[in-house]
Image (tube, rainbow, N blue to C red):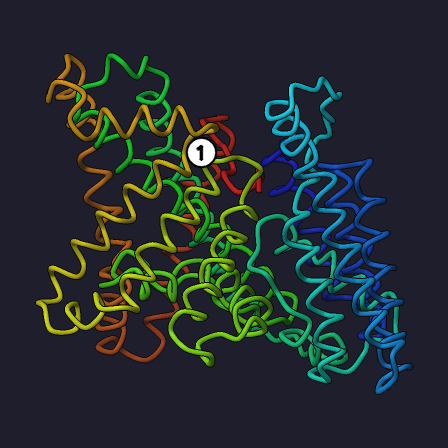
Amino acid sequence: MVFSSVGFLFYFLPLAIGLHCVVPKSWRNGVLFVSSLVFYAWGEPIYVLLMLFSTLLDYSLGLAVDRWRGRPGAKWALAASVAINLSLLGVFKYAGFFVSQLNALTGLALPVPQLSLPIGISFYTFQTMSYTIDVYRDHVRPQRNLISFGAFVSMFPQLIAGPIVRYADVEAALYQRQLSLEGFSKGIWRFLLGLAKKLLFANAIGLAFSNIQAQPVEGLGALTAWLGIVCYFFQIYYDFSGYSDMAIGLGKMLGFDFPENFRYPYAATSVTDFWRRWHMTLSSWFRDYVYIPLGGNRRGKARQLFNLLITWLLTGFWHGASWNFVLWGLYYFAFLALEKLFLSKWLDRAPKFLGWAYTLLVTLVGWVLFAFESLPQGLAYLSRMFGAAPLLDAGFVYAFLSCLPLLVLMALGAVGLPAALASRWSSRLRPGAEGGLRLLAALVLLLLCTASVTAGSYNPFLYFRF
């Protein structure tokens, strides 16, 4: 189910934030918890019960781990948390895939479960599971207030598509947080930047990719196929980083400092560097809870590569129950392994432009596997990009010229040029002038975004399906 953007922007959001600001401090977590449940029920009225079950489960098991610390019961409580959380993901996200694959391999005709995917389940199960693990590792204190824990799990700014917020990131703020006019204004600005990324850039370029994707693949010329994946390349960055900016901005309005999720990944000069910049909260989650516990790089090169393989198989599969996501994970494992074996030494010595061009090409090809619902579709599209098609088709010139101004603007923004220029200019302004210019820019962005929302234009949220 897709959220009503107009309703969310103009009704729920101001009410929830305003109520949070005016109630006594001791009520704020309760207001946040109830508001978040309302927000989730707006989009998933049935599966809110599933999120409440996950909340109660890990709240109870976190307390059990602490109560039985140093005894076997703590390990059993931790194992129960991991097993049940992964089982929830397995049932709702992967059961249909596994049953259909079993039928294909064995010739059986088992009924394939047709369960709709609960919004945000991949994110909140990781958050609750990591909480129990961190309590077991004695990295955080167990939260003894169920309402406060519920506010952490269901926190509406980042519930649906991240960033993945660990309990340690918000532990202090759950106990005591200060609201300030400065923090609120920074939050509004960050939210509007994210909203503009999403509505003004991601949606516009996403429509161009959607038009190319809708054409029969056998009729695409090679250049049109490349143009389409370049459009998707920018769409997914501006869509997801825009949502992360909105979540971080909303968090600041509520007194929380959520972790950054993107750091100009398209400026990376290696695949390793790319994954230090893209969806950083997911990369660090798999590093801390999968790669390092498996042994990381502490047991020799062969074991390190094995650990990397397992981590990237799981990373790919986390994104969706489809062979194209598995192949996507293996694809990135291959390049990361090559860089760890020898390629990073060459990249360190080569001109940075070559490293950037190599990373750009790897990323573009990787997004093909990500953009299509099935592996055959992705492979067919790749074949058009790499030679199984004439160079030009009838629609390329028009599509390219239509996209070109937007692609140039998005390319400059994706490598941080506007932010760098704004920082340089702001240092030259008279005291007080920066605030006035930012207010003017915020009003312009708000007007443009409002016009986009009310126009009911093309408005997908790519990460809802994960």
Q: Nearer the viewer, residue 76 or 237?
A: 76
Tell me where residue 310 appears, x and y as whole percent.
51, 58
Please state the total of marks drawn on the protein image. Answer: 1
Q: Nearer the viewer, residue 432 or 422?
A: 422
Viewport quadrant of the C terminus: top right
152 versus 362 height, above or below: below
309 versus 75 height, above or below: above
Residue type for callout 1: Ser
Q: Quadrant of residue 163?
A: bottom right
The residue labelled by disc 1 is 452
Tell me where residue 280 appears, x and y as whole percent.
46, 64
Q: Residues within 10 Å of mark 1 (few under 14, many from 20)?
A: some
Q: Residue at x 52, y 38 (%)?
A: 461
Left or right position of 259 against 146: left
Q: Quadrant of residue 257?
A: bottom right
Q: Quadrant of residue 118?
A: top right
Residue farthest along the bottom direction in this orientation: 70
Mark 1 element type: helix
Q: Residue at x 23, y 51 (%)?
A: 360
Q: Nearer the viewer, residue 152 or 297?
A: 297
33 versus 105 height, above or below: below
Tell me where residue 235 appears, x and y as whole percent.
37, 40
Tell me where residue 162 appears, x and y as whole percent.
57, 55
